[in-house]
Image (cartoon, grey):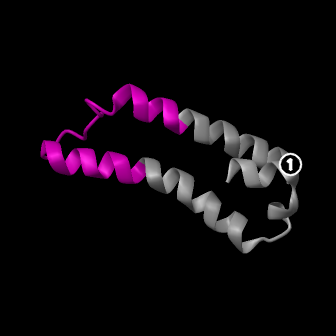
Amino acid sequence: YAKILQQYSKDVDLVAKIYQKYSSEPPIQRDLPPVAGRIIWARQLYKRLQEPMNIFVANKTILQYPDAKKII
């Protein structure tokens, strides 16, 4: 579980960097209007972080690690 949390921490950092880099001009799919494309881009980043978080909350043993609370 500790390695999973470390990898999730790296993923959180990566998503934060991606957001900071592209927040003013996010990559948008070709056939989407600009506003809808930005919303979809932001939702994809959110979903990338939220799905593992739901698993962590469901599995209480992961939350018992000392680093878990800091990462979450």
Q: Specify whether residue 26 is painted magenta.
A: yes
Q: Quadrant of the N terminus?
A: bottom right
Picture coordinates of residue 65, whole percent (x, y): 87, 56
Provide the residue span drawn in magenta: 15-44
Picture coordinates of residue 42, whole percent (x, y): 35, 48
Residue 64 appearing in the image:
yes
Horizontal relation, residue 67 to residue 14: left or right: right
Q: Amino acid at mark 1?
A: Ala
Q: Is residue 26 above or below residue 1?
A: above
Horizontal relation, residue 7 to residue 39: left or right: right
Q: Is residue 61 above or below residue 44?
A: below
Measuring 81% from the left and 48% from the top, which residue is drawn there?
67
Q: Main secondary structure of the magenta part?
A: helix
Find numbered disc 1 in the image and state the secondary structure of the residue it sits on.
Answer: helix
Picture coordinates of residue 22, whole percent (x, y): 35, 29
Measuring 16% from the left and 47% from the top, which residue is drawn there?
35
